Amino acid sequence: MDDSRKHFDTRAIHSGESPGPDPGSHVVPIYQTSTFIFDNAAQGARRFAGEEPGYIYTRLGNPTVRALEEKMADLENGEDAVAFGSGMGAISAVFLQLLSAGDHVVSIKTIYGCTYSLLTGLLKRMGIEVTFVDGTDISQVRDAIKPNTRVLYGETPANPNMAVLDLEAFGRVGRERGITTVVDNTFMSPAVQRPLDWGVDVVVHSATKYLGGHGDVIGGIMVGSSEFVSQVKEDALKDVGAVLGPFDAWLLIRGLKTLPLRAERHNTNAQVVAEFLENHPAVSRVHYPGLASHPGHELSKRQSIGGFGGMIAFELSGGLQAGRNLLDSVKLCTLAVSLGACDTLIQHPASMTHSSLDEAQLLAAGVHPGLIRLSVGLEHPDDIIYDLRTSMEGA
């Protein structure tokens, strides 16, 4: 990349946008096709044999999807990327590519509910073992490693209690033991945090969230070395088939162009809202890395690029019932799961996104039954605060 495109804001717009088969198009075209035509039989044979570059079938590759992959590889400072039909498609593909029966995973204990279900359900039935540890204590990660450990898995901040993982230490442990480290960067996005820069091997995203940014597309991304991406495309993507469609890829490309601007507003809004919540008498605890009271504040400040993200978790003094009353009282905040949309989303993890965990598992993962998760949107922060304040007064 030349110097004129070195800044993240510029790269978010221009990376992956090089002219393709339609060089006259100002934006990446939507190649809404399932298959691609060969000039002759010999060319088709060469492409299937890998002797000639070119597209064959959209499950194996598509120009619109490829533009998205190139953009995300650049934004995460990775060598290459592969897109999937969902975030769980990306996470599943990484595990399937790296693990075999008899292997072992060390995972932080607070992770997205469906990732937890995958590790303790399908992968367990396939003969894969997992040990959950407190990711804020890197010695627990190190001590849990076994001779058959193949993956160290983490999120930071963790979903939903916002625990912060030391990315540099996490990556170092993996390198020292020859184990692949994988980090879900969905909560922050590359506008705020880039795990590969800290020595992590593989980054995954639910592109549905901040990357898309508008709540209108489902997708997933994995970024890593060219070698590993090639392996995943050849095996876990091609043969399992969690493929992203061209139109969804186009929506994600469009969303990424405004990611730097959106991330800045999400960050500033969340900081203001978190400070309001911390000082409200109805709130017993706020989990937000931007607060000095958060145990991961200094670590998050060190490994983030700017800001602390748009996600907040908090607990009301009135407990679970007060939380339910709040969810039923908000007018501006949208009662819905997901995150990273333009509007503020509010939900109850224990009964929604993490409902696959029983009460004991929730507590073990650090998810309090009364925890509320807030994805702070792009509205004026005063309006978000007004909605929360008036709703808590009735809670």
Image: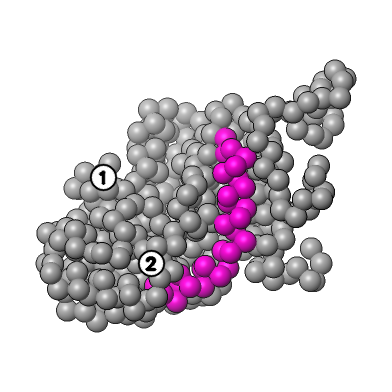
| Local secondary structure at mark 2 | loop
Outermost top residue: 41
Within 10 Å of the Cα at label 1, are there few (<14), some (14-19), or many (20+) other Cα atoms? some
| Vertical position of residue 292 compared to residue 98: above or below | below
| First in sequence: mark 1 vs mark 2 | 1
Q: Which quarter of the picture shows residue 363?
A: bottom left
Disc number for residue 202: none
Q: Residue at x 32, y 72 (%)?
A: 384
The span shown in magenta is 243-270
Q: Residue at x 51, y 31 (%)?
A: 100
* Residue 368 position in % (x across, y down): 22, 58
Apparent side of residue 22 relative to residue 125 in the rendered image (left or right)? right
Residue 84 vs residue 201, the one in the foreground: 84
Q: Circle 1 sits on which residue?
A: 355
Q: Which corner quadrant holds the N terminus?
A: bottom right
Q: Circle 2 sits on which residue?
A: 376
Q: Residue at x 34, y 46 (%)?
A: 113
Alpha carbon distance from label 1 to label 2: 22 Å
SS majority, magenta = helix
Q: Residue at x 41, y 66 (%)?
A: 377
The answer to whether residue 169 is seen in the rendering is no
* Residue 114 position in % (x across, y down): 37, 42
The answer to whether residue 106 is seen in the rendering is yes
**Front tag of 1 and 2:** 2
Query: Magenta segment: does it hold 287?
Result: no
- Kindly identify the amino acid type of the residue bearing the numbered disc 2: Val
Residue 83 vs residue 336, the one in the foreground: 336
Query: Magenta segment: does it hold 251?
Result: yes
Q: Which corner quadrant holds the C terminus?
A: bottom left
Residue 292 vs residue 102, the one in the foreground: 292
| Local secondary structure at mark 1 | loop
